[in-house]
Amino acid sequence: MRGTFGLGRIFKKGLAKDQKNEKNYKQKNNYLNIPEILELQKEKDKLDDEENKINDEIDVVENNNLKLKNEINDFETSKRQIKISALINDQKDLRSELKDELNKEDNTKNDKNINKIKNKIETLQKQIRINSKQKEKFIRNIVDSKESIEINNSKVEILNEKIKAIKLKIATVEKKISDEIEIQDIKNSKIRRRKVILSLLIPIGFFGMYFYGIGRNRFQVSSDVVVRKSGSSTQSGSSISTFLGLGNQGSLEDARFLKIYLESPQLLDELNNVFDFRRRYEKRNPDIFSGLKKNATKDDTYDFFKKQIQIILDEVSGSINIITFAFDSKTSLEFNNFLIAKSEEFVNKLNQNIYLRQIDFVEDQVDKNRERLSSDLDNLKKFQRNNLSLNLNQELIASSGLISSLENKLIDLKLGLAVLKRQFIDQAAPEILYQESRIDELKKQIKEERNLLVSPSGKNIGEKASNLSRLEANYQFSNDLYKSSLTASEKTKLDSKQQQRFMAKLSEPFLPENQWYYWRHKGFLTSVGILLVSYFLLKFFMGIADSHNY
């Protein structure tokens, strides 16, 4: 306990005592009228008071130790602040300086300086003696404080020994109290056990009476159907998806849609046209729990409707297991047959609504693409007829060839001009001037031909060729689009036959002769399980609450 200054003992009294002893004390409250326990409790209280007094004495001693330790720290700080070594060093320096002054010759000595140094040395000696005495005083105080701390620690050890002895006595008394309480618990445990067993057997007996006596008979009818594609058996038999168990995905998706449809509210409305659902499933005495209330809302009726059917989809094979429940076998069979009929109707509507729309769509696209192709062809013919040309590319090549031949001739004339300029000294000779005029005329002719080739007022072959290329590209695109739409139309018609869905019955429903006992076993075991779990949870939480209280 040293160094904690009483805090450890405070926690020890506040926690250890409460946690170890209060449980027995709480239990003892139920047996306060027993004289033996009252005497033992009085003896324990006296020991607790004695222990608290000793703990208070220990706290006083340790608080005194805390003050002594603080004084020691103050003495140590003051002792470190006393500077003796620095004063001794200063004294040595002054003596060396005095020695140097005394060793000087008589004519150079300074008596005033010598006396001044001697006075400083005497002052330092007095200060050193004063500081030494103060330091010795602090050391004595520190030693005295440490001796006091040792004495206090010895007292604490003696008091701790007393506490140990008292705790042994307290433990002996608590053991006697626990033994007395245990004896009383043994006497009362049989009574408590009987109460618990009785409190569990009564509701279990009620559950058994309801589920195996009062509860109305229930009948179950089951059937299996599957939605398939007409071409799935031939097309997907050798595919990798079939090898991996993923074949016939389209039919599996349709089966999911069918499962949602069979649990939809509109199916409940159509079922009322076959038989009165509310009247067949209404509550009847003495079973007041099973069935539909007379004043049930539409939402309540729909929720009850979903509980009377089970649509189980096998994700691997795609088959659907349709299960119906009713309070009589005839209703259960009618209910199941109704769901099968609605399943067939749903699959037929699915084929008509989806695939006929696809065929209408592709045929409409074929008509639009045919009209577009005819329009583009008319535009192309009209352009060729207006420009009196079937192939502008050939005209463009011919015009380009003419310009090229003129440019070649221009090169020849320029070479001839260069030869004439070397032959004649006079550059204004008629032959040279004639040759230059021919070159100029030829350049003008080439320029006119070029302008005529691209000018809007001339042949304008470039723009016409661009328009012709655009019209031909439109025609080619429309032609390809028309061919593609024809192919898609034929493929859609073929796929609509191959992908057409049909529903097959794997197992037919039949009229059950025996009632369905599974709901009785399940309801009874579930109720008993909930009762037992609730009991143990309640016991668990009560134990937690008791542990927090302790």
Image (spheres, rainbow, N blue to C red):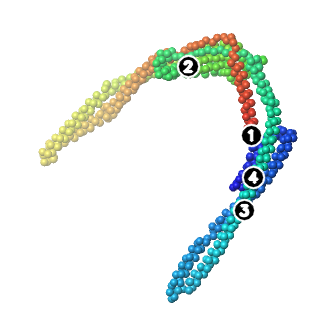
| Label 4 packing within 10 angstroms: few (<14), some (14-19), many (20+) | few
For the residues carrying marks 2 and 4, which lies nearer the camera in this image? 4
Task: Please name the amino acid that badge 1 sits on.
Answer: Ser
Task: Please name the amino acid that badge 2 sits on.
Answer: Gly
For the residues carrying marks 2 and 1, which lies nearer the camera in this image? 1
Q: Nearer the viewer, residue 224 or 15?
A: 15
Task: Please name the amino acid that badge 3 sits on.
Answer: Ser
Q: Quadrant of residue 402?
A: top left
Name the spot of residue 121 as percent of width and height, x first: 59, 79
Figure label count: 4
Q: Residue at x 36, y 30 (%)?
A: 467
Quadrant (top left/top right/bottom left/bottom right) for the C terminus: top right
| Mark 1 or mark 4, earlier in chain | 4
| Mark 4 or mark 3, earlier in chain | 3
| Mark 3 or mark 2, earlier in chain | 3
| Residues at marks 4 and 3, CA–CA distance in whole angstroms | 20 Å
Residue that label 1 marks:
547
Q: Residue at x 83, y 38 (%)?
A: 30
Name the spot of residue 205 as percent of width and height, x first: 77, 22
| Residues at marks 1 and 3, CA–CA distance in whole angstroms | 45 Å
| Residues at marks 2 and 4, CA–CA distance in whole angstroms | 83 Å
| Residues at marks 3 and 2, CA–CA distance in whole angstroms | 93 Å
Please tell me whether mark 3 sits on a helix, a strand or a loop: helix
Q: For residue 161, which numbered disc appears in the image? A: 4
User: In this orientation, does residue 371 appear?
Assistant: no
Please tell me whether mark 1 sits on a helix, a strand or a loop: helix
Residue that label 2 marks:
318
